[in-house]
Structures are given as structure tokens and as C-alpha cells.
Image: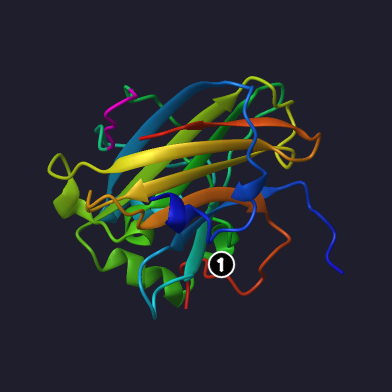
Amino acid sequence: MRRALARSRTAATDLGREPRHGTASAFFFAEHSTNTGNTVLLICGEQIGMNAANLLATNVNMAVVAQDFYFGGPGDVVEG
Amino acid sequence: MASTRSTWPGTCCLASGARVASTTAIIRFVPADDRPQQQRCGHGTERRYALLATSDRQTWAVVASSPRPRTSGPSASTRSGARRVLLGERVVHLGLRGQHLGAPAAPAAGQHQVYLDTNRDGTDDYVVLNRDASGLGTISDGGN
């Protein structure tokens, strides 16, 4: 059984159709500094199928979900 | 979009009440030539910032960020696997930042899930989330 490392990493999972569906990658740790409530998730563009051609040319929609599962607190969602 | 999210475990426990105080999106464009340097801890070079993500209901702001190591570590990032990333002219970093008022300063206590509809067809294409580093040891770190 794995023990929690108290370190988080940022995972990007493809929700597209098979065979890509469920494919995940994690290039970076998630940033969570001491005494802060902020969490910074970093990914490479290639993890979401993008590259430099999308610079200032591509907009994406996003929705954000927050969960406090450790202490059982409520979460929230910001719909895109 | 909701049906897509239901395929990912954990979101079913979502409750309401707390507030996501702020959610910002960062995108960093790092020239490929800077990539090896960027991969060294704390010695990155960020050339440009640009806002990529937009939302009909949320204003996304660009915030500064500092370079951080890859999960594979500075030594591992120099393996041949990193070359695949260097093939492109530029490497795009997209950072997503969320603050949860009810969450304490414990990285593993809260989870942020960012659903991305990259082609804006109404169906989520990717989900980006933080998860404990001990899980899923087979997940790709970008190397070969």
C-alpha cells in the first residue's frame, strides 16, 4: 500500500475518445507554498494538445472545481 | 459537459457552500532553447506571458509565476526523454491557479480540477488536477 507523500503533482488527463481517453501525464509538481490557500497547477501545452501555434490565437473554455476532501469541507465550482 | 465530468472519480462528492476565491490562468511561452535551463530548479527563464483561457462567466487574469522543477527531477529531465519536448519550436506552459477559502495550507487536503474545453465545442477535452504524488506510478512524466 502506498503512503501519501504530501506532495502533489499536476496531472492532465485526456477526456477525448478512445484510445486517448483516460491517458494521463504529469510533468510538474503542483505548487502549494507554506501558509497559503493557493494551489498552482502547471502543465505543458503538449499535455492538452497545444503548442506555440496556439499563442494568442486559441481560446479555451474552462470550469474549475475545488474540493476539500481531507477535512470533509464543502467544495465549489466555477462554471466556464 | 456534465456527463464528461462524471467519468472522473471524485467529483461526485462535490458540495456547495465554500467559495473559490480566485481563479486565474497563466500561460508561459518558453523558447525551446531555454528549456534545459528552465528544467533546472529555480533557474528558469520566462520570456513572455499571455492570456490564453477565457470564460463567459469568469474573468481570467495573468499572474506571475516562478519556474519549478519537473516531477522527474533535474537530473532525470536531461535524459533522452526530454528531447521529445525540445523538438518543438516552443514549449507552452499553461498554469492554472485556484484559491479555496476553506482549504488550509495543506497541499494534499484540497483538490482543484480544471476542465478544459480546448476546441470549445461544449465538451470537456482535458481535466487538469492536483493529486498526491504517490499515486499512479506509471503515469507519464514526459520522458521516454
Image x and y of residue B138, in percent: 62, 75
Image x and y of residue B126, in percent: 40, 56
Q: Which secondary structure type mostly characterizes the magenta part of the structure? A: loop
Residue A61, placed above or below residue A20: above
Residue at screen point 17% across, 45% down: A58
Question: Magenta stretch?
Answer: B53-58
**Label 1: few (<14), some or many (≥20) within 10 Å?**
some
Q: Is residue B40 visible?
A: no
Residue B117 versus residue A54: which sits nearer the camera? B117
Q: Chain of mark 1?
A: B
Q: Is residue B2 magenta?
A: no
Residue at screen point 29% across, 61% down: A49
Residue B110 versus residue A33: which sits nearer the camera? B110
The amino acid on which the numbered mark 1 sits, given as a three-letter code, is Ala
The part of the image, by quadrant, that contains residue B109 is top right
**Quadrant assignment for the C terminus of chain A:** top left
**Quadrant assignment for the N terminus of chain A:** bottom right
Would you say B113 lies left or right of B136 here? Answer: left
Q: Secondary structure at mark 1?
A: helix
Residue at screen point 56% across, 67% down: B76
Q: For mark 1, what is the residue?
A: B76
The part of the image, by quadrant, that contains residue B108 is top right
